[in-house]
Amino acid sequence: MRSLRGNIVRIFIMMSIANTVLLVIMYIVMLNYVVYRIAAPLSIHRFLPTIMQHYYAGGQNNELHHAIDDRLRLYGVLSITPPRVADRNLHIIYPHNLAGTAIVLDDYVMQYRITLPNQDVIYLLPYIQPSQHPTVNTFYPYLFGGIGVGMMVTVVISAVVGTFFSLRSIKPLEILTNLSTAQNTIIPVPRQLQQQLPPSTTREINQLAVAIDNRDSEIQHQIILRRQLNADIAHELRNPLNTIGGYIEAMRDGILNVTPARLNTMYDEIQSLHQLVDDLRLLAQTDSHEISYTFQPTRVCDLVSKSHEIMTPYAQRQHINLINTCAIDAVYIQIDMSHMSRVLRNIIDNSLRHSNPQSEVIIATDATDEHVMIHVIDRGCGIHPDDMTHLFDRYFRARNTKGSGSGLGLPIAQAIIVAHHGTIRARSELNVGTTVTITLPRYGDHEII
């Protein structure tokens, strides 16, 4: 497995070599283009009038070199190499030192065929093929030699530069890796990874550090909550068991008589144990997506009335007035009645436990064309603002919680509501009260029919 540092260095080297080769190719192409497409045609057009004047004046092929050389001397230092001239038999007329040399016309991509006044024919050709140009011919050995040296220098420089940049880029990642894999003890306050990085860290690395830190914070928070859950479950199990065991032992020994009140007390403790076990089982089913739902169109007021009827005795025992204000009889929602009734009862129970005696808990409803809202409003102690963000976290118990509870009710309620394609949210103010709102999709009247 290759390291990221090695990959960065290799990328630098490959890019440098590719750029060098590309520049060389571009240079050769441009050189050939200048020589063959610009310089050679320019020389032909520069000397074409001189050649035509020579023949119109009655000059002969063997005298052409005098006319061209005379014109060439007039150009002086600004002279351009004259083109080659061949007769109809493809023998060179100019330059004079090559006179009589036979040529192959197909070797020249650029050709000018000129018909003379005497109906004879001559050919004007580039003075030399680009590959034979003295400048290119002289330059090529140096060019390819320079390519080899340049590539070696480029590889060395790229390796040095790539190593430097890779060290700067990899160092923060190494720090993050060390921090992430370090076997640190879990502490209440999570470590801030991004504060331990060098100040020159790039934006992406810093974002990664923040993400890792948030992950560690959440993991530590969950671990702390799980530890608290173990303590809470042990406490919740110990108290009812101690109460039931104490009553049974006293009755068995004849210290206490069996009375309906004492049996009711033991029954309530057993029910609380059942509730705790049922919450744990339902939470496990939620995690494994094993909860089955039977969705049926249900009137909103039927759901509210059923939960109100079940929770009214509990409210009366706490001297709290539980009020049902549902007035949207014709509005339906598609729900699993048993699960959604459990959710609503759980929310009402929370409101009752956090309300003061002689106060009210109101169940209100309203609807739009697409949604139905169920509100549970209390005038209790409220929730601390710092606890609102963790209200639906598993195993979380608010700091001003009254009575017992495992911290599983609201997370379970949220999971069930999400399965119904709904949402749950809470608004609260300390010493004023709390409003919990369940929002569910409305079931259309035409679907009911």
Image: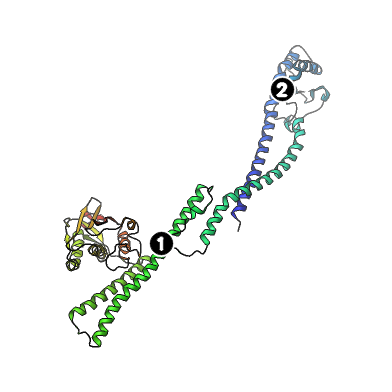
Q: Residues within 10 Å of mark 2 (few under 14, many from 20)?
A: some
Q: Amino acid at mark 2?
A: Ser
Q: Quadrant of the N terminus?
A: bottom right
| Direction top: furthest residue | 57
| Residue at the spot of label 1 | 221
Residue at image coords 66%, 47%: 160
| Residue at the spot of label 2 | 43
**Residue 252: horizontal and vertical position, in percent?**
25, 87
Q: Amino acid at mark 1?
A: His
- Residue 403 located left or right of residue 227: left
Residue at image coords 42%, 65%: 223
Q: Is residue 133 visible?
A: no
**Contact (Cβ within 8 Å) of mark 1 with mark 2:** no
Q: Nearer the viewer, residue 24 or 253?
A: 253
Q: Quadrant of residue 330?
A: bottom left
Q: CA distance from mark 1 to mark 2?
A: 84 Å
**Residue 156: horizontal and vertical position, in percent?**
69, 46
Q: Nearer the viewer, residue 145 or 206?
A: 206
Q: Secondary structure at mark 2?
A: helix
Q: Residues within 10 Å of mark 1 (few under 14, many from 20)?
A: some
Which circle, 1 or 2, is nearer the viewer? 1
- Residue 304 located left or right of residue 395: left
Q: Secondary structure at mark 1?
A: helix
- Disc number at residue 113? none
- Residue 361 located left or right of residue 201: left
* Vertical relation: 188 (above or below) 259: above
* Vertical relation: 61 (above or below) 415: above
